[in-house]
Image (cartoon, helix red, strand yellow):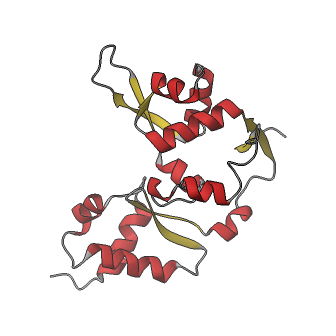
């Protein structure tokens, strides 16, 4: 019988993982060693004031750089690429209505969605194909990614602001921004 600490084993498994892990993934590696959610909360608390944090995004656990230190890791030169208003609106529709098809996005927005808009959002890592709808024509559905949650510092999609929050912030009382800055790393010098 091993005398290793469950927290140490948990830390090692999450650290070495190539991608964020679900509770089921973690349990496969360390087995049943007590209350896994409790152990994860304990480990996250132990890392709360460190340079890296243990976080849960969309039901998956991983280590990430502490948000207040991220600026130390950015490349020295960052090219800013603007998201068009259409891309911001499309991302919003997908986030609030996922999984959603292109025709549904177009119906909600009232205009056609170009393939380029979808491509930009997929390139940013914020949306992904989410299967096909079981309707005539079997249209492709889109959903947000864990990268979307991480970029917008959300734990779950239910953390998106509601209508009352948006009104309170004054975002529904005026014209929405024409463009949203989206940082893309550039290796050009």
Q: How many marks?
A: 0
Dividing the picture into quadrants, the one containing residue 158 is bottom left
Residue 81 visible in the current orientation: yes
Work out whether residue 139 or residue 31 is closer to the camera in this orientation and state it.
Answer: 139
- Residue sitting at the far left: 1
Residue 185 vs 69, above or below: the answer is above
Q: Is residue 83 left or right of residue 118?
A: right
Image quadrant holding the C terminus, namely top right
Residue 77 vs 50, above or below: the answer is above
How far across and down, in percent of the image, does residue 52 sit?
56, 71
- Residue sitting at the far right: 189
Image quadrant holding the N terminus, namely bottom left
Residue 144 visible in the current orientation: no
Residue 71 vs 187, above or below: the answer is below
Give the residue at x 28% y 82%: 4
Dividing the picture into quadrants, the one containing residue 81 is top right
How far across and down, in percent of the image, does residue 87 sit?
64, 33
How far across and down, in percent of the image, does residue 175 sit?
76, 41
Give the residue at x 59% y 59%: 165
Work out whether residue 100 or residue 49 is closer to the camera in this orientation and state it.
Answer: 100
Give the residue at x 68% y 59%: 169
Work out whether residue 87 or residue 53 is closer to the camera in this orientation and state it.
Answer: 87
- Residue sitting at the far bottom: 3
Dividing the picture into quadrants, the one containing residue 39 is bottom left
Q: Is residue 109 left or right of residue 77?
A: left
Q: Is residue 164 left or right of residue 155?
A: right
How far across and down, in percent of the image, does residue 115 sit?
57, 20
């Amino acid at each position: 019988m091993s005398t290793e600490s469950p927290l140490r084993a948990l830390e090692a498994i999450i650290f070495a993982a190539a991608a964020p892990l679900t509770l089921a993934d973690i349990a496969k590696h360390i087995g049943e060693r007590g209350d896994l959610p409790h152990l994860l909360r304990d480990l996250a608390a132990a890392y709360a004031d460190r340079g890296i944090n243990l976080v849960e995004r969309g039901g998956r656990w991983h280590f990430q750089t502490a948000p207040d230190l991220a600026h130390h890791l950015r490349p020295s030169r960052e090219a800013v690429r603007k998201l068009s208003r259409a891309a911001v609106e499309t991302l919003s529709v997908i986030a609030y209505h996922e999984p959603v098809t292109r025709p549904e996005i177009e119906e909600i927005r009232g205009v056609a969605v170009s393939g380029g808009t979808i491509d930009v959002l997929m390139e940013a890592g914020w949306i992904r194909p989410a299967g096909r709808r079981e309707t005539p024509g079997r249209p492709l559905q889109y959903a947000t990614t864990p990268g979307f949650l991480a970029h917008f510092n959300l734990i779950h999609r239910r953390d998106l602001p509601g209508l009352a929050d948006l009104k309170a912030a004054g975002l529904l009382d005026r014209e929405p921004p024409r463009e949203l800055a989206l940082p893309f790393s550039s290796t050009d010098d």
